[in-house]
């Protein structure tokens, strides 16, 4: 497909981001709530200014303190980032891009990155599948997919040869986003896979069959597949590496993350040599970034120095909203689309799509 023929999808108008009114209103243009705007208005009313005049001049008030208020400068900066995203078109890839989201270190944001980037791309109109092969099933939880022991899951696909199309379920909050859930049965899958034929290729073959079935049934081609891995290099993760063409590595901005990265890259090199020569580390995303600490800045600088082509410009900050979202069985994209965390994942998704 030529670049001129490649169809594109527009980033959708998220609840708090998208309407023309939301971006034209001075108060929201600086990302402040209506309650905050009212507070500013009340102060000006007390000073003898009419409420209509005061609300209309909230933007001017904030503009005047941008140089002296760190909070106002940050809000203005976030608004500029949102304006750059509004209306941006994301190209559909020429073929399905399959990402393994992996890091041998736990707690670096693998699942959070998987579900939020998948949600951002799907909300932009692209067809996205998330495959949860982590026995904890956290990606399934975040997407609101049932994954109790009685549900057919990716375990049945890998061990019992159940077709992938029989286990995928739609995300209730976002159109065009589907998920193959994980159940607790996956905890024993590592042992059961040992004795099976072509044990490293079972997920890849299931994905290939599913793609053919979608085409046969007249369904749209999948644009992206994200495989959420457990924090280890067992047979489940090896299956993910063999099925994917690209590796997305979330790196927490702390020292231990750098140690884990070097070992992960050695393991990926082994996979490339023996099982999947087409696998490449295409994307590195810095997560849990705390701009108040020198350590976070140093880790980010070091990673960018060693992997200048792979590291995304978008950086995901530490965010309470990102942490809260899974407890409501949502991604941060739907839980609080106006948050800084949602904005960062939107930027990351756009970068990935445009690479």
Image (cartoon, rainbow, N blue to C red):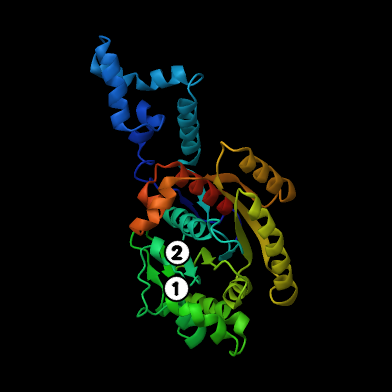
Q: Nearer the viewer, residue 30 or 149?
A: 149
- Total marks placed: 2
* Front in this rendered view, residue 263 or 24: 263
Coordinates of residue 225 in the picture (x, y in percent):
52, 66
Neighbours of disc 1 within 10 Å: few (<14), some (14-19), many (20+): many
Q: Quadrant of residue 152?
A: bottom left
Query: Regarding mark 2 in the picture, which secondary structure is present there?
Result: helix
Mark 1 lies on residue: 182
The numbered dot on residue 74 is: none
Quarter-of-image position of residue 63: top left
Residue in the picture at 44% in, 53% down:
124
Disc 1 element: loop
Give the residue pinned by disc 2.
Answer: 139
Q: Is residue 34 visible?
A: yes
Residue 13: % across, % down: 38, 45
Mark 2 crowd level (few <14, some 14–19, many ≥20, 10 Å Cα): many
Q: Nearer the viewer, residue 36 or 244?
A: 36
The residue located at (61%, 80%) in the rendering is 201
**Label 1 with label 2: CB-CB less than 8 Å:** yes
Q: Is any atom of residue 25 visible in this view?
A: no
Residue 330 percent coordinates (x, y): 37, 57
Q: CA distance from mark 1 to mark 2?
A: 8 Å
Q: Which mark sits nearer the N-terminus, 1 or 2?
A: 2
**Residue 206 position within the rendered picture, expressed as x and y whole percent measured from the top left:** 52, 80
Q: Decide: is 231 above or below 355.
A: below
Q: Residue at x 65, y 58 (%)?
A: 282
Left or right, 245 with reference to 82: right
Which one is in front, 169 or 75? 75
Q: Is residue 245 left or right of residue 225?
A: right
Q: Residue at x 41, y 47 (%)?
A: 321
């Amino acid at each position: 497909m030529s670049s001129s023929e490649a169809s594109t999808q527009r980033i959708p108008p998220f609840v708090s981001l998208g309407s023309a009114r939301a971006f034209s209103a001075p108060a929201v243009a600086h990302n402040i709530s209506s309650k905050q705007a009212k507070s500013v208005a009340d102060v000006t009313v007390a000073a003898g200014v009419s409420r209509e005049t005061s609300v209309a001049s909230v933007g001017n008030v904030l503009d005047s303190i941008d140089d002296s208020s760190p909070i106002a400068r940050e809000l203005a900066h976030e608004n500029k980032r949102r304006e750059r995203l509004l209306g941006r078109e994301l190209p559909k890839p020429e073929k399905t891009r399959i990402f393994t989201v992996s890091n041998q270190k736990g707690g670096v944001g693998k699942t959070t990155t998987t579900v939020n980037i998948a949600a951002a791309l799907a909300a932009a109109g692209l067809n996205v599948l998330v495959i949860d092969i982590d026995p904890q099933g956290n990606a399934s939880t975040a997407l609101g997919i049932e994954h109790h022991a009685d549900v057919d899951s990716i375990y049945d696909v890998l061990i019992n040869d159940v077709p992938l199309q029989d286990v995928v379920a739609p995300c209730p909050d976002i159109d065009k986003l589907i998920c193959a859930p994980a159940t607790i049965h996956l905890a024993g899958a590592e042992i059961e896979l040992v004795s099976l034929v072509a044990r490293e290729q079972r997920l890849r073959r299931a994905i290939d069959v599913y793609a053919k079935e979608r085409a046969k049934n007249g369904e749209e081609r999948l644009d992206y597949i994200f495989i959420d891995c457990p924090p280890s290099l067992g047979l489940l993760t090896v299956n993910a590496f063999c099925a994917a063409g690209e590796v997305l590595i979330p790196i927490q901005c702390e020292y231990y993350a750098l140690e884990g990265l070097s070992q992960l890259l050695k393991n990926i090199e082994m996979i490339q040599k023996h099982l999947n020569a087409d696998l490449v580390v295409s994307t590195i995303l810095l997560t849990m970034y705390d701009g108040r600490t020198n350590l976070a800045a140093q880790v980010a600088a070091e990673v960018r120095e060693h992997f200048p082509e792979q590291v995304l410009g978008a950086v995901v900050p530490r965010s309470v909203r990102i942490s809260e979202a899974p407890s409501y069985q949502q991604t941060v994209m739907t839980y609080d689309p106006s948050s800084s965390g949602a904005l960062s994942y939107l930027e990351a998704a756009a970068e990935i799509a445009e690479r």
